[in-house]
């Protein structure tokens, strides 16, 4: 049995401790078990009845928290309630909580249930914060009450059986079983009483007409409505109902809406119009005149609104406060002069405005602080609260300026002032800390609090890098000694202690020491490349640089990581993987003559070892025997037919495909694709011999032919000029001899013959053309002179031999004859 008690206590108290007064031995056992499973800063929860006398015991805090009484006294334990009333008092000498002020549950929470209030027990050295929640239990100390002493009704004698009349709802400040439970109507022959519940849980009664009224017999009825609660002893409240029977009025007012909804901002000035209700009555005269009023069955509490009895306009009667009331729900009643009524529901939602600034309360603050205090040292605790709701009540705290202190959230509305950087008395010996607390309203409201902090001296200043991580990019194929980047470390000390040296920490990169990759200047921290990098081998690497000052003993230092990225260059051209280019054998792709448009002939596959856009490949058709037959996919390198293959298409097709990368400048590779258009293999074999020895068409051949022709032409013109010059020179010599007295001796150059007997130089040019099977390639041959007696001035050339199965290079033969 004890085991089940212990187990039940554990599951009940695992999230919160709920301690009732007075406590039983079983509950004490629960507290011991709970204190074993919960941490010392767990939330404690007590339950006490309201209206306890001052000094009554609430609970033993020291025992429940597992704290020693000495700890309560040395930690200066105290209760922190903020701006709330301090209902409880901590007895540090006994470790108990007692009632400090009278607790009225209805005044504290109203209709809210369960009712509780929370405060914190704060201890220092070290700081501890223990939230404590006290639940206030309701006692039946309030009787149901009606707002009015009496309730007047005017009912027409023509009212139909079953007509309903809402009666004033009673209010009971108690809750639960102590709250309002039932309504009773004094015995009568005309009306019966029914009970209903509003959506908010409040109960009201409706009087239903059971027997028709007769004004001539009974013009007035006096009834009593009694409201009773369920407490012990039971309490009740009574209201008199005075019914005046009116003459017949057969049409009641009717509202055009069953429910009216509106919104109004808090702090709206008095007289602000919210909305207008409207009801119409088909009757004429006095019976058709409608007046408006708040229904007593559910009227607005507190007099915040007023209604124009004639127009039905609802106005603000006094200042609204969103922090107190967020929504109002009430009933407006329309009544004609005949006493017939109609009701409509009105819901008015209060919109919050940012009318409350945050409030800062200082819990503790320590000054001075040693400069060697570690980062995150708590120097103060503040409490910040904002009475607004939603975004208007969301508070943000920050430290203004460059003080090395930041605000961190601790528990709920508590914030800790902690250091976020090392303190240095040599730089700043004291400074002000300005804390700004602002809400999220529009416009935001804020409050500031200034703290003066002094720094006590400690000599401790290591070098500090300006960055936590350095990163640089270097292009591959760099020259050794290229400066990559500079690292900078600063030491706020002076003289030798501030002299910083930079050291490259030893580590391996791919099995090689890091010193083989980079070097660092010990004086200025410039990092240089020790080698030329290759992106395909090393894409990036990390190294560690140490900054060490000149202090002694020992020197202080700090490290930083340097990340070096190698940037790719377009230093590799594309490599064709397929089709394989072989020198000794021929590979050809076969395309049937029945191939349709889009037939996949083959696919050129190429790779580029570069990266990024340098490795993006594109394929283009450079040359083709028939460009109208094939095309190459720009991205995938697929060779497809672009029209229907016909019988007129040549069997042998030769395609030159160029593969280019996207680098700057781009690199390319060319591949020759042989295609055979045939339906069967024997047909391919019949053409295979001619196909393999087909003459290659090359643009370089045309260039060489043109160059050879230009050289020959230049030599020809030079020879002609030389010959003419010689002839003119000889002619002048002959003229000299002619006019002289010397005998004329004819002179004939070797191999010269005046065949025509005219002493002139006939020029004979014989040309013979050797044509190949391809009309685009020709060899020119200059034939032998017609007569062997002619003088050969120049004899240059080779014979043109033509073979049907071998390709010959064109040669130019030139002979000049005189």
Image (tube, grey):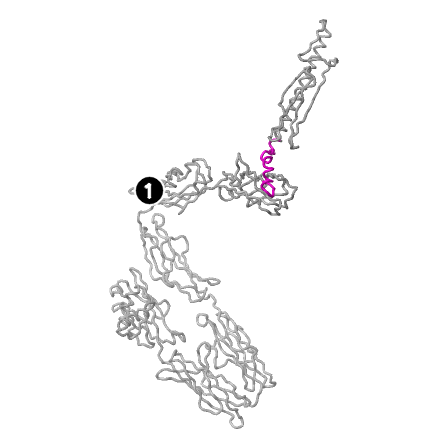
Q: Residue 114 location, x and y as percent?
A: 38, 74
User: Could you tell whether 604 is left or right of 795 in the image?
Assistant: left
Range of the magenta residues? 675-701
Which quarter of the figure is the C terminus placed in? top right
Q: Is residue 699 magenta?
A: yes
Q: Farthest residue in the front direction?
A: 682
Q: Is residue 180 above or below residue 693?
A: below
Q: Residue 15 location, x and y as percent?
A: 34, 67
User: Could you tell whether 323 is left or right of 79 in the image?
Assistant: right
Front-lying residue, 303 or 141: 141
SS of the residue under disc 1: helix
Q: Quadrant of residue 69?
A: bottom left
The answer to whether residue 707 is seen in the rendering is no
Q: Quadrant of residue 546?
A: top left
The residue under label 1 is 497
Q: Is residue 566 magenta?
A: no
The answer to whether residue 150 is seen in the rendering is yes
Q: Residue 534 location, x and y as percent?
A: 45, 39
Front-lying residue, 710 or 134: 710
Q: Is residue 656 above or below residue 424?
A: above
User: Could you tell whether 603 is left or right of 781 in the image?
Assistant: left
């Amino acid at each position: 049995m004890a085991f089940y008690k212990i187990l039940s206590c554990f599951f009940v108290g695992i999230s919160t401790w709920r301690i009732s007064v007075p406590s039983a031995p079983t509950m004490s056992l629960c507290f011991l078990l709970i204190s074993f499973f919960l941490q010392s800063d767990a939330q404690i929860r007590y339950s006490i009845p309201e209206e306890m006398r001052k000094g009554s015991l609430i609970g033993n805090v020291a025992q429940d928290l597992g704290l020693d009484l000495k700890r309560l006294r040395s930690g200066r334990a105290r209760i922190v309630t903020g701006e709330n009333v301090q209902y409880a008092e901590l007895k540090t000498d006994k470790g108990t909580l007692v009632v400090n002020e009278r607790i009225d549950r209805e005044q504290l929470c109203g209709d809210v249930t369960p009712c509780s209030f929370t405060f914190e027990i704060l201890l220092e050295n070290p700081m501890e914060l223990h939230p404590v929640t006290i639940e206030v239990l309701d006692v039946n100390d309030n009787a149901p009450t009606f707002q009015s002493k009496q309730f007047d009704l005017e009912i027409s004698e023509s009212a139909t059986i079953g007509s309903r009349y809402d009666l004033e709802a009673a209010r009971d400040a108690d809750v639960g079983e102590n709250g309002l439970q039932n309504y009773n109507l004094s015995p009568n022959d005309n009306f019966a009483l029914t009970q209903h519940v509003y959506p908010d849980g409040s109960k009201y009664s409706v009087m239903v007409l059971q027997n028709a009224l007769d004004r001539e017999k009974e013009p007035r009825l006096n009834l009593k409505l009694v409201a009773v609660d369920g407490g012990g002893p039971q309490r009740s409240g009574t209201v008199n109902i005075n019914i005046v029977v009116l003459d017949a009025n057969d049409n009641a007012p009717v509202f055009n809406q069953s429910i009216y909804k509106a919104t109004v901002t808090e702090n709206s000035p008095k007289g602000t119009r919210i909305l207008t209700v409207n009801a119409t009555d088909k009757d004429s005269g006095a019976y058709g005149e409608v007046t408006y009023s708040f229904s007593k069955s559910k009227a607005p509490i507190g007099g915040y609104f007023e209604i124009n009895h004639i127009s039905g306009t609802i106005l603000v009667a006094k200042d609204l406060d969103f922090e107190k009331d967020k929504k109002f729900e009430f009933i407006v009643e329309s009544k004609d002069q005949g006493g017939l009524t109609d009701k409509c529901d009105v819901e008015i939602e209060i919109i919050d405005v940012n009318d409350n600034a945050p409030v800062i309360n200082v819990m503790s603050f320590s000054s001075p602080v040693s400069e060697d205090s570690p980062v995150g040292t708590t120097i103060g605790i503040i409490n910040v609260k904002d009475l607004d709701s939603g975004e208007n009540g969301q508070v943000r705290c920050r430290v203004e300026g460059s003080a090395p202190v930041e605000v961190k959230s601790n528990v709920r509305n508590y914030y800790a002032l902690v250091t976020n950087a090392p303190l240095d008395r040599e730089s700043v010996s004291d400074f002000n800390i300005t804390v700004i607390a602002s809400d999220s309203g529009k416009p935001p409201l804020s409050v500031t609090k200034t703290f003066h902090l002094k720094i006590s001296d400690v000599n401790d200043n290591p070098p500090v890098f300006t960055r936590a991580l350095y990163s640089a990019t270097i292009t591959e194929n760099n020259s050794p000694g290229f400066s990559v980047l500079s690292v900078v470390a600063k030491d706020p000390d002076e003289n030798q202690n501030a002299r910083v040296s930079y050291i490259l920490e030893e580590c391996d990169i791919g099995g090689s020491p890091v010193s083989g990759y980079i070097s660092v200047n010990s004086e200025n921290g410039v990092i240089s490349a020790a080698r030329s990098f290759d992106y395909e081998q090393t894409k990036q690497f990390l190294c560690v640089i140490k900054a060490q000052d000149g202090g002694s003993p020992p020197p202080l230092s700090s490290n930083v990581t340097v990340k070096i990225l190698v940037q790719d260059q377009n230093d590799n051209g594309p490599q064709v993987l397929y089709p394989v280019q072989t020198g000794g054998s021929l590979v050809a792709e076969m395309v049937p003559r029945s191939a349709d448009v889009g037939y996949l002939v083959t696919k050129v596959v190429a790779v580029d070892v570069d990266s990024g856009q340098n490795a993006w490949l594109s394929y283009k058709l450079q040359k083709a025997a028939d460009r109208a037959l094939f095309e190459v996919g720009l991205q995938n390198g697929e060779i497809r037919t672009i029209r229907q293959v016909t019988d007129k298409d040549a069997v042998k097709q030769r395609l030159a495909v160029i593969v280019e990368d996207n680098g700057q400048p781009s690199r390319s590779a060319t591949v020759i694709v042989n295609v055979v258009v045939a339906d069967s293999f024997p047909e391919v074999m019949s053409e295979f011999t001619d196909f393999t020895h087909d003459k290659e068409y090359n643009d370089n051949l045309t260039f060489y032919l043109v160059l050879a022709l230009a050289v020959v032409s230049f030599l020809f013109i030079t020879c002609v000029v030389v010959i003419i010059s010689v002839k003119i020179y000889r002619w002048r010599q002959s003229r000299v001899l002619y006019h002289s007295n010397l005998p004329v001796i004819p002179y004939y150059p070797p191999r010269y013959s005046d065949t025509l007997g005219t002493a002139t130089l006939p020029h004979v040019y014989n040309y013979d053309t050797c044509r190949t099977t391809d009309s685009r390639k020709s060899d020119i041959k200059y034939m032998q002179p017609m007569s062997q007696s002619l003088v050969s001035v120049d004899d240059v050339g080779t014979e043109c031999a033509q073979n049907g199965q071998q390709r010959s290079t064109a040669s130019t033969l030139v002979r000049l004859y005189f």
